Image: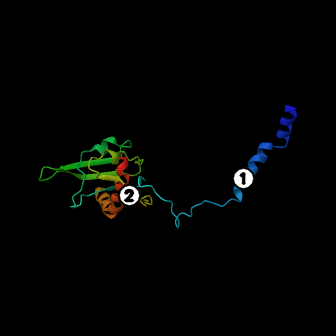
Amino acid sequence: MKAIKRFLKTFLLWELLRALAVTGRYLFAPKITVQYPAEKTPQSPRFKGLHALRRYPNGEERCITCKLCETVCPAVCITIDSEVRDEETRRAKRYDIDLFKCVYCGFCEEACPTDAIVLTRIFEFHFENREENVITKEELLRIGDLNERQIATDRALDAPYR
């Protein structure tokens, strides 16, 4: 009896008919496609997008060039050069991130003791020239200044889990 059943399943292509039934069920079901430019899916406050450098409320940049983010980066995409200022404090003279190398892991954000470098929710960015992949300190500070309200809100929402 098993041999006859197996022969009929093989002859009638039973697995193929079952697969077509599944396809047919989903063919007429309502679609869940997101029409991307017009509709956007919700993002988590922990989303890891484009980098930004933050400032203190008094306008001074937060980065003290401890180079922990440069050390912990698995892709070795961060380059920092420091300078000593008049008050014997260190600040970053150069802070570059090569976005072609970056894997957006967030290790730099976690290692930073002053919350200077953060990953924002910005994911819609592109390059038209190959040289634009290296983002400089000035650009990072500009991104941080433009998105400070969103960054502060995301940090406050994530604070209970840190």
149 and 140: which is toward the camera: 149
In the rendered view, how is the structure colored? rainbow
Q: Residues within 10 Å of mark 1 (few under 14, many from 20)?
A: few
Percent position (x, y) of residue 41?
51, 60
Q: Residue at x 53, y 65 (%)?
A: 39
For the residues labelled 2 and 1, the Cα–Cα distance comes to: 45 Å
Callout 1 secondary element: helix
Residue 51 in sight: no
Q: Assign a secondary structure to mark 2.
A: helix
- Residue 145: quarter of image: bottom left
Viewed as shown, does residue 143 lie left or right of 84?
Answer: right
Against 85, is 147 above or below? below
The residue singled out by tag 1 in the image is: 23
Q: Is residue 111 visible?
A: yes
Q: Of the two numbered discs 2 and 1 on the same chain, state the one appearing first in sequence.
A: 1
Residue farthest toward the front in the current orientation of the protein = 160
Residue type (three-letter) at the residue carrying disc 2? Glu
Query: Is 53 on the left-hand or right-hand side of 34?
Result: left
Task: Identify the residue under disc 2.
Answer: 132
Q: What type is the residue that disc 1 sits on?
A: Thr
**Rendered-image quadrant of the N terminus:** top right
Image position, residue 54 (x, y; %): 29, 57
* Rendered location of residue 162, percent (x, y): 35, 46
Where's residue 101, x and y in %?
40, 47
